[in-house]
Amino acid sequence: MLRLLRKLFSHKHSPEPTMAPEPPVHKQQIDWATYFPKIEKREMPADNSVWCLVGNIVGERINGDGNTVYGTKHFSTGTKVYCFPSQWGDGYEKILVIGRHRKTSRNICIIMPAKHIRNWRLKKVYHPHILGLMRSKSGWSNRLWSKNEIESLAGVMNLRYPAN
């Protein structure tokens, strides 16, 4: 018995390492590329951004009572607001905007009159929170047609509501 154990565990008589058997090959290999051709991805720009119509809140305005008011109820003077495209057919009189609230300092999304916004311009936006809101509420995109539409709209709005 002892001789048998020595023979099994000695290095001289160790058997050659064996390879695992190859898996059986099927007669017909399926070419999945014929069934599922590559789907072309839409061209997306490398950067994660959108074109946006941007303006600033007016400095001084007269409210309904005839009193002088600085800014609006939600935004202080000069706050940058990111404007959405026209959501309804009112001629861009009331606009859905994103801006930093005057008291909480958090970005809010509200509808406000366009007459309280000045200095309209085109800007590329990279802020993740604003990007998410623009995408979820059908805002502007990073396409060329969006850029051209914003440029023309900014020109019209600067003529309609000139800076003081």
Image (cartoon, helix red, strand yellow):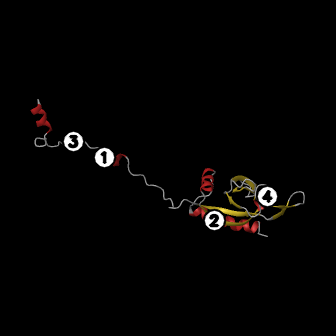
Q: How many marks?
A: 4
Answer whether labels 3 and 4 touch (C-beta < 8 Å). no
Residue bearing the label numbered 3: 22
The amino acid on which the numbered mark 4 sits, given as a three-letter code, is Thr
Mark 2 or mark 1: which comes first in sequence? 1
The amino acid on which the numbered mark 1 sits, given as a three-letter code, is Asp
Give the Cα distance between marks 2 and 4.
Answer: 23 Å
Give the Cα distance between marks 3 and 4.
Answer: 76 Å
Eye-nearest disc, 4 or 1: 4
- Please tell me the numbered disc located at residue 127: none
Residue found at the far right of this picture: 66
- Please tell me the numbered disc located at residue 72: 4
Give the Cα distance between marks 1 and 3.
Answer: 21 Å
State the SS at label 2.
strand
Give the Cα distance between marks 2 and 3.
Answer: 61 Å
Image-based side of 39 in relation to 157, left or right: left
Q: Position of residue 152 (x, y in %)?
A: 66, 66
Image point 25% across, 42% down: which residue?
Answer: 28
Eye-nearest disc, 1 or 3: 3
Residue bearing the label numbered 1: 31
Query: Is residue 59 placed above or below 31 in the rendered structure?
Result: below
Residue bearing the label numbered 2: 123
Where residue 70 sits, quadrant-wise, is bottom right
Where residue 123 sits, quadrant-wise, is bottom right
> How packed is label 3: few (under 14 Cα within 10 Å), some, or many (20 or more)?
few
Eye-nearest disc, 2 or 3: 3
